[in-house]
Image (tube, rainbow, N blue to C red):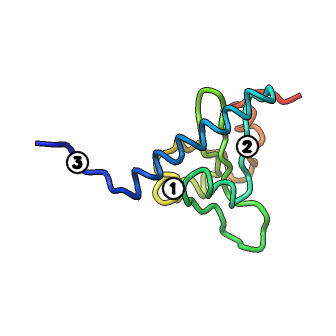
Amino acid sequence: MSGPQVSPVRQENVEGRARRRARLRELMARHGLGAVVLRRPENFAWYSGGGNTRVEYAAPEGVADLVLTAEAEYVLTSTIEAPRMRDEEAMALEVVEYPWHEGPDAALRELVGEVE
């Protein structure tokens, strides 16, 4: 008996994200970058295969960032938005939370270190 079937759409998202991850890591290596932060909603959607980080559609930034390092990939968002990211928008990615009243800077530094 074979294992569970993976939907073609879900499989495309997994394979597509692997290709996008490889492209970004190649770019990071070429430019000597330790990390890339995708903050704009359209970039998050591109990388995640359609995830939506918008709450207020007039704002240029979403409520979550996608952080890619040479070793890992994370969704960085507030404690308020973390459940939605886990359940709806970034189900296959590790979600890292920060207290909504503190902002993302300290959590981002923990993930990628100090930027010069």
Residue corresponding to mark 1: 83
Residue 18 versus residue 78: which sits nearer the camera?
Answer: 18
At horizontal 77% and vertical 74% (from top left) the residue drawn is 58
Marks 1 and 3 sit apart, C-alpha to C-alpha, by: 26 Å
Three-letter amino acid code of the residue under disc 3: Pro
Percent x, y of residue 51? 56, 59
Of marks 1 and 2, the one in the foreground: 2
Residue 2 versus residue 87: which sits nearer the camera?
Answer: 2
At horizontal 33% and vertical 56% (from top left) the residue drawn is 7
Marks 1 and 2 sit apart, C-alpha to C-alpha, by: 20 Å
- Residue 26 placement, left or right of 96: right
Three-letter amino acid code of the residue under disc 2: Val
Reply above or below: 20 against 29: below
Count up the numbered dots.
Answer: 3
Percent x, y of residue 50? 55, 60
Residue corresponding to mark 2: 37
In the rendered image, the quadrant that contains the N terminus is: top left
At horizontal 73% and vertical 43% (from top left) the residue drawn is 37
In the rendered image, the quadrant that contains the C terminus is: top right
Element marked by disc 3: loop
Query: Looking at the image, is mark 3 or mark 2 earlier in the sequence?
Result: 3
